[in-house]
Amino acid sequence: MQCTVQWEGKDAQGNDGMAFTAHTESGHTLRMDGAPASAPGEPGGHNLAPRPMELLLAGTGGCTAYDVVYILKKARQDVRGCSVRLDAERAPTDPKVFTRIHMHFTVSGKDLHADKVQRAVELSHTKYCSASAMLEKTALMTFSVELVQE
């Protein structure tokens, strides 16, 4: 897998910004930006795009939600919706790694078996989700499941 990230340089006003553009191997482009500077002279962005760490968290949510839907479909469950809310805490000092991540899954469908939904979430967390496996090296990972029958 390959990705190229390029600094966008000066903004429209000629100031140094902290925006970057990533080009993925699959042909997609996305932007990242930093938070505005907290003091004059410090580097800062313009809040025009997600922060890189937000993208890391979003990617983890996408990775695990993908697993859950796939596992439930293989189990012949009539899954109709799946969302995951990730609440994370970071270390107070550099490097400000994630130290705690809680994932709350909301899975909806018709005649879903609660045990199969719970098992799908557990399998994603313990076996399949590459992003979770990496983040688990620094963060305590927990999860909860909400089942919505349609």
Image (spheres, rainbow, N blue to C red):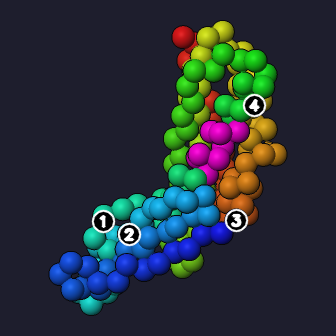
Residue 65, position as x, y percentages in the image: 62, 39
As displayed, is residue 43 above or below residue 142? below
Q: Is residue 129 left or right of residue 90?
A: right
**Residue farthest to the bottom, as pictured:** 41
Amino acid at pointer 3: Met
Per the picture, the main secondary structure of the magenta-coloured stretch is helix
Residue 47 marker: 1
Which residue carries the number 4 mark?
71
The CA span between labels 2 and 1 is 6 Å
Which residue shows up at 72% across the image and 24% down it?
Answer: 73
Region in magenta: 60-67
Query: Is residue 127 rendered magenta in the image?
Result: no
Q: Provide the secondary structure element on which disc 1 rests.
A: loop
Tag 2 and tag 1, C-beta contact below 8 Å: yes
Q: Is residue 15 left or right of residue 139?
A: left
Q: Earlier in the sequence, mark 2 or mark 1?
A: 2
**Callout 3 secondary element:** loop
Residue 33's disc number? 2
Q: Residues within 10 Å of mark 2 (few under 14, many from 20)?
A: many
| Contact (Cβ within 8 Å) of mark 1 with mark 4 | no
Horizontal side of 73 relative to 110 (left or right) equals right
